[in-house]
Amino acid sequence: MSTGAVDLLVVGAGAAGIAAAREALLLGLSVRVLEARGRVGGRAVTSHTLGAPMDLGATWLHAAQSNPLVPLAEAAGLELFDHDAVRSSRVWMGGRWADGAEMAAYERAEREWGIAVRLAEARAEGRALSMADAAPRGGFWDATLTHWEGPVIAATEAAEVDLEDYLSTLLNGSNLLPREGCGHVLERLAEGLPIVLGAPVERIDWGGARVRAEGAFGAVEALGAVVTVSTGVLAGGGIVFSPALPAEVEGAAHDLPLGLLEKVGLPASGADRLDSPAFGGIERRLEEGERAMTFVAWPFGRDHLEGFAGGALAWDLSREGEAAMTDFALSELRRIYGARADRAIQREGAVVSSWGRDPWARGSYSAARPGRAGARRLLSTSVGGGRLRLAGEACHVSLAGTLAGAWLSGAEAAREVAASRGLLRAGAQARGAGAGTSA
Ligand SMILES: Cc1cc2nc3c(=O)[nH]c(=O)nc-3n(C[C@H](O)[C@H](O)[C@H](O)COP(=O)(O)OP(=O)(O)OC[C@H]3O[C@@H](n4cnc5c(N)ncnc54)[C@H](O)[C@@H]3O)c2cc1C
């Protein structure tokens, strides 16, 4: 590859990298994106193995009212489906499903759980608390709720999640499902961008007047760079920075470790839909310390169930391999449906994500370690006089862990590098300012 310099180098073609590249082009800059994998999308990828789209990573466009991807997907003609309008859930109590009164009690307990953790944070007066420190215990639904908010939502055990960070990144607004998948949305938004696939960056030299990225592909030089690799890749030394990143920036990557959420798609083997409607949620009431998977049945009326495993369970299953993930999912369904689960599901056709073992991700999304909520701002600090800026989901203070946060962070990073490197040309600043939301 030629070493001809571009204005902006972007490392990674996930949501943040795609947004950074689009923003740079809107600002009139020359740009090149180097992507390690043979595809775009990063932690958003849509599988078609089951004969219908299934996202193995990002699935919902959360916080739809403030999500920049919503207007962009709509402008690209992609259908977004309001999942909240059809959401339903059933909770297995062991031997039977929860009845109406129990479901109402569960909802009440959920509100009380939320109030309790907020009160704990308000009373902490600056003391670092984890989600587990603040979560109520001993109530009939408490273990189920803490499992939901920790391993399932934060993809991390409650004791390892900083409470302030958890509360600052709570999502509001509706949850939309792109019918063709979130991975497909990103593929469409990346069309036409100057992305080099199969180009893992091994080393970034940012000590001179230009930033230089090197790897087996050759070298690329630029006046500034936006690096969007995950905190798992950063903290694991996936790229060597020369000089080393400032201690506070590198420390921030370690303070924002990736949790793990893995998905499994289980195809139906016959007509049995396990008494569950399309989009029906299936979960179990849990005792403290119990591990479980949750399910969304037959999304869009398709012929597969989607299972979610998070936190320590996901890491353990990920180490054991794909078959272990499928076996665990089936054992969960067997607890509820008995041998009927084995007849209803076609085990051999299962599709399993592997974010934990993926060297270009090394997890699913970030959660701040207890006491380290400030790490997101530190991670986003420009270095080298604005030559280099990290970006991605972990850099967003309120939409961390989402496509929206990654997108906004990438666009902002591109603007920041362009401004500090004196790359904003006449008229370009005004054009670029809306890249987060314009088509
Ligand atoms: C199972 C799962 C479910 C999720 N559910 C949702 C959801 O429903 N809604 C939601 O909004 N978000 C969800 N997320 C989170 C969302 O996927 C991420 O927040 C988002 O995709 C992160 O984007 P990013 O650009 O920051 O990072 P990435 O997508 O990781 O992009 C970084 C890119 O850098 C590349 N890269 C890594 N190392 C190198 C290197 N050395 N050289 C060159 N390139 C490199 C990677 O291949 C990758 O393409 C989910 C994630 C997972 C895993």
Image (tube, grey):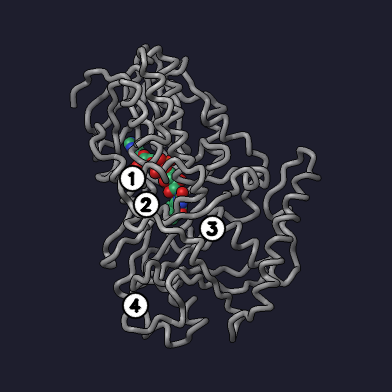
Residue nearest the viewer, comparing 33 with 399: 399
**Quarter of the image where ligand 1 sits:** top left
Q: Earlier in the sequence, mark 1 or mark 4?
A: 1
Q: Are marks 2 and 1 in contact (CB under 8 Å)?
A: yes
State which mark lies toward you, 3 or 1.
Answer: 1
Instruction: Give the number of the disc on residue 311.
Output: 3
Cβ of mark 2 under 8 A from ligand 1: yes
Q: Quadrant of the C terminus?
A: top left
Asked if labels 1 and 3 touch by Cβ distance under 8 angstroms, the answer is: no
Front of the two marks 3 and 4: 4
Image vertical order of residue 158 relative to residue 434, above or below? below
Residue 85, above or below 356: below
Identify the element where label 3 is drawn: helix
Rendered location of residue 278, percent (x, y): 42, 72
Query: What distance separates the C-alpha of mark 1 from that of mark 4?
Result: 28 Å
Amino acid type at mark 2:
Cys
Q: Is any part of residue 266 visible from this angle?
A: yes
Q: Which residue is mark 2?
A: 182
